[in-house]
Image (tube, rainbow, N blue to C red):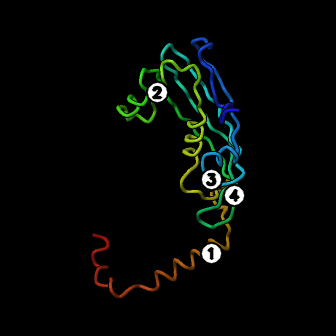
Amino acid sequence: MRKYQAFEIAFVGLKNEVHHFNYEVDNAFFESFSPPDFKDSKLSILLTMDKKDNFFLLNFEITGSIWTVCDRCGDPFEMNIWDEFPLVVKRVGDPKLMQRENDDPNMAFIAQQESVMNVAKWVYEFALLSIPMQRIHPNDKAGNSTCNPDAIRALEEMKKGKEEKDNPLWKGLEQFRNK
């Protein structure tokens, strides 16, 4: 069995129209590329492919959730994910040459003689791009942080202590702070 066979689209027999494909990915999928820095991922990918004669208009819509650690308080939490990524895939004679000459990140190339397109790599890349770099507990409906209150208090105390310990080396530079 070929790796990522479930992500192969045999497009030769498909009509020139819009087609939909659904994929479910979890940590096992991410670990097959590289170990993720999150756990218990449950992502759904809706791939819409508008097939044309020599190119495809792909749109990846990613929804789901992951369990990660809050960057502010250090507690684990479930983060909801949603994002959308367009991609144009052109059928060309020499895809490697075209990829080197083209720097558009929303464009990819496959060989003209190909009859199957594997989208696993794009699913992986777009799923990772949909996860924010900064992972912080979301605020509640009232706009208050849902982070661990003990950790927030400790951070505030550290911040207050740092402000009290002004370094005398920088004392003369305070006059330039608001200029």
Tell me where residue 140 appears, x and y as whole percent.
67, 56
Assess disc 2: are there few (<14), some (14-19) or many (≥20) residues with their C-alpha within 10 Å of its C-alpha: many
Along the polypeptide, which appears first: circle 3 or circle 4?
3
Q: CA distance from mark 3 to mark 2?
A: 27 Å
| Amino acid type indicated by mark 3 | Pro
Q: Identify which amino acid the numbered label 2 is placed on.
A: Phe
Image location (x, y in percent) of residue 23: 68, 33
| Label 4 element class | strand
How would you rate the neighbour count of disc 3 (Cα within 10 Å): few for under 14, some for 14-19, many for 20 or more? some
Find the distance from the CA under tag 3 to the CA under tag 1.
30 Å
Marks 4 & 2, CB-CB < 8 Å contact: no
- N-term-proximal mark, 3 vs 1: 3
Task: List the residue tagged with mark 2.
Answer: 109
The kind of residue on which mark 4 rests is Phe
Query: What is the distance, in whole Å, between disc 4 and disc 2 at their CAs?
Result: 38 Å
Number of the front mark, 3 or 1: 3
The numbered disc on residue 171 is: none
Q: Position of residue 42 (x, y in %)?
A: 71, 44
Residue 47 appears left or right of 166: right
- Would you name the residue on which mark 1 appears? 153
Earlier residue among tags 3 and 2:
3
Disc 2 to disc 1: CB gap under 8 Å:
no
The amino acid at mark 1 is Arg
Q: Which residue is mark 4?
A: 77
Contact (CB < 8 A) between labels 3 and 4? no
The mark closer to the camera, 4 or 2, is 2
Q: Secondary structure at mark 3?
A: loop
Mark-to-mark CA distance, 2 and 1: 52 Å
Vertical comparison of 120 with 136: above or below: above
